[in-house]
Amino acid sequence: MVHGSFENPVNELRVVSVADPLAPRTLLSYPGRDVYMQFPRLWDDELWYGIADNDWTAITEEPRIEMLDLAQPDAPPVVFGADQRAFMPAPGREVVAWKSGGTAEMSALNSGVLTLYWRASGEVNELPLPGPHVGANRISYPSVGNRFVAWWDDIQQRQYVYDLAERHFRRLAEYDWTGDERVSKPSLSGDLLVYMHHLSDGKRSLEWCVLPR
């Protein structure tokens, strides 16, 4: 959360126990103009989040992913993806997904490359999406389910997911590239994929599907 005045903002990361929801605890606190934190995600006792150091002189930022183990409150954050300009973490059972890449200007919030950190091996894979695209930086807001990974794609006429069991991309839908029909804002939880379907007549609907296990 960001609070304080315009001249002196503070960026804080807080947690609260479901057993005592009126007693929040501040884990990290930084001057808001120097450090940017966003997209906290919980996985068991792990708290993942994106953090970026701002350089207002050069008008650049240096994003990365960090993880705090809430079961070890005195342990320092574990850092991932600093060399990849990583942001937008999505933790899961087998992998942690994030988007990486981009230029030094606003790279934290711009689209990037789908990146997977495999927990068992420590392997990190950057996975540019298949097919025609504008550069390699196309994805944002990844989400991880039981077997698949989903994301927001800059090219909304096609819908892909990544299969963790088979380790390859699967295409779920493709529409006329010159038309208006498309999907947006897919989000995955477990085996359930939810997304917005925009039709060619301007109407849109919230749709969902259950993916294979």
Image: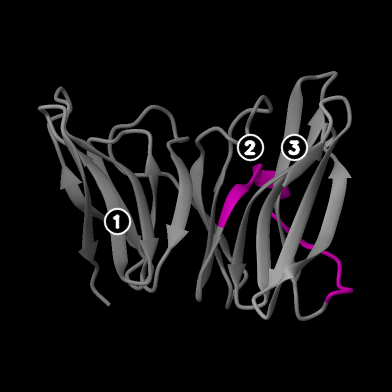
- The residues tagged by marks 2 and 1 sit, at their Cα atoms, a distance apart of 25 Å
Q: Mark 1 Cα within 10 Å, few/some/many (few <14, many 20+)?
A: some
Does the residue at mark 3 contact the one at mark 1 (Cβ under 8 Å)? no
Q: Please give the residue where the numbered disc 2 appears in the rendered image.
A: 108
Q: Nearer the viewer, mark 2 or mark 1?
A: 1
The residue at 85%/18% (across/down) is 57
- The residues tagged by marks 3 and 1 sit, at their Cα atoms, a distance apart of 32 Å
- Identify the amino acid type marked 2: Ala
User: Foreground: 8 or 139?
Assistant: 8
Q: In the rendering, at what x and y percent does residue 85 appear?
A: 66, 42
Residue 153 as seen in the image, left or right of residue 35: left
Q: In the rendering, at what x and y percent does residue 166 appear?
A: 32, 70
Q: Of the two numbered discs 2 and 3 on the same chain, state the one appearing first in sequence.
A: 3
Residue 57 as seen in the image, left or right of residue 88: right
> Which numbered disc covers residue 194?
1
Task: Mark yes or no: residue 81 visible.
Answer: no
- Magenta residues, start to end: 73-89
Q: Of the two numbered discs 3 and 1 on the same chain, state the one appearing first in sequence.
A: 3
Looking at the rendered structure, the secondary structure element under dot 1 is strand
Q: Nearer the viewer, mark 3 or mark 1?
A: 1
- Identify the amino acid type marked 1: Val
The residue at 23%/41% (across/down) is 158
Question: Where 32 sits versus 192, above or below?
Answer: above
Asked if the stretch drawn in magenta spans residue 88, the answer is yes
Q: Please give the residue where the numbered disc 3 appears in the rendered image.
A: 62
Residue 188 as seen in the image, left or right of residue 7: left
Q: Of the two numbered discs 2 and 1 on the same chain, state the one appearing first in sequence.
A: 2
Q: Quadrant of residue 196?
A: top left
The residue at 63%/47% (across/down) is 86
